[in-house]
């Protein structure tokens, strides 16, 4: 006999359950409570797999031994650029606790992105890369990113070496998540692997151009534009359909956002 027989609208968090992630299957019932420092929390039971869980199971709040508001405040402080040591002093938490919470939040955010970020229309993607470093300048790392200009959506990024393999991973991940209802207008800089990857993955089903900026003393002194895939007529048609671009150009929005994020976190930009 179950303690409670009322069936509720929840899904089972057990990956091995036949109803995993499925709601409204009439398999979840209320199953008592468990005590907390500030009250109690409801428990649930899956009648299919006999798994007992609570509302926090499979969430970053599970067994944190503190309030959800405190967890959210720690994450918000990190997003605003406050380092872990400062957060631990402000919130009177140990450094290890703050680090563990932020790691949980990162995993949950990635899981949410994988589940929610899909089915968007790929109209005008632009790819770029930035080089920064971890701890010391000798440990440099590249962030290769792609932004959908129309919606300002950041669908994919790769952290690692600046090479053909990672550029291919970037575009493959974006293609899997997106839908191409029309001929996309793709823009990148002059990094050679971009052209190889785009020709291989898109072929003639896109319009692709490169915008190469020549800099001197952190100032742009020349801009060269090259049409790699497509005719001038197809490029004109793509620009006419665009809600954001009138000429073939790479927006500085993506790099500006990354630069601001790095500066806020107290890290130095090396080169892009």
Image: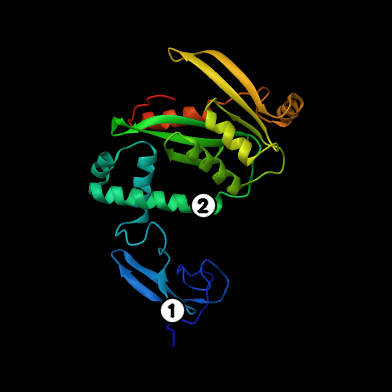
Q: Residue under circle 2? A: 114
Residue 111, image x, y percentages: 47, 53
Q: Is residue 202 left or right of residue 270?
A: right
> Does residue 152 appear in this view?
no
Horizontally, is 140 left or right of 128 in the view? left
* Residue at numbered disc 1: 50
The residue under the point 55% across, 26% down is: 189
Q: Residue at x 53, y 25 (%)?
A: 252
Residue at image point 53% right, 18% down: 213
25 vs 140: above or below:
below
Q: In which quarter of the image is the N terminus?
A: bottom left
Q: Residue 93 carries which label?
A: none
- Mark 1 or 2, closer to the camera: 2
Gap between marks 1 and 2, in whole Å? 28 Å
The spot of residue 16 in percent (x, y) is 46, 71
Element at label 2: helix
- In the image, taking residue 169 as reference, residue 247 lies left or right, namely right
Q: In which quarter of the image is the C terminus?
A: top left
Q: Earlier in the sequence, mark 1 or mark 2?
A: 1
Q: Residues within 10 Å of mark 2 (few under 14, many from 20)?
A: few
């Amino acid at each position: 006999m179950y303690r409670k027989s009322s069936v509720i609208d929840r899904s089972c968090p057990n990956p091995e359950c036949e109803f995993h992630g499925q709601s409204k299957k009439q398999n979840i019932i209320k199953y008592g409570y468990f005590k907390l420092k500030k009250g109690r929390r409801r428990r649930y039971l899956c009648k299919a797999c006999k798994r007992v869980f609570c509302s926090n199971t499979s969430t970053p709040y599970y067994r944190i031994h503190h309030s959800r508001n405190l967890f959210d405040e720690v994450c918000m402080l990190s997003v605003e650029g406050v380092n872990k040591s400062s957060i631990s002093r402000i919130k009177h938490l140990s450094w290890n606790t703050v680090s563990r919470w932020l790691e949980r939040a990162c995993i949950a955010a990635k899981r949410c992105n994988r589940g929610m970020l899909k089915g968007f229309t790929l109209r005008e993607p632009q790819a770029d890369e930035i080089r920064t470093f971890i701890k010391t300048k000798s440990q440099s790392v590249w962030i290769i990113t792609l932004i959908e200009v129309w919606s300002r959506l950041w669908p994919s990024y790769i952290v690692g070496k600046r090479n053909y393999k990672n550029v291919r991973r970037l575009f493959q991940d974006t293609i899997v998540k997106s839908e191409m209802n029309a001929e996309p207008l793709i823009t990148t800089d002059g990094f050679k692997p971009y052209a190889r990857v785009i020709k291989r993955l898109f072929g003639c089903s896109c319009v692709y151009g490169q915008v190469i900026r020549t800099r001197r003393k952190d100032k742009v002194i020349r801009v060269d534009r090259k049409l790699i895939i497509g005719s001038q007529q197809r490029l004109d048609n793509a620009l006419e359909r665009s809600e954001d671009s009138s000429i073939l150009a790479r927006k500085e929005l993506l790099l500006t956002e990354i630069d601001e994020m790095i500066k806020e976190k107290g890290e130095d930009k090396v080169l892009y």
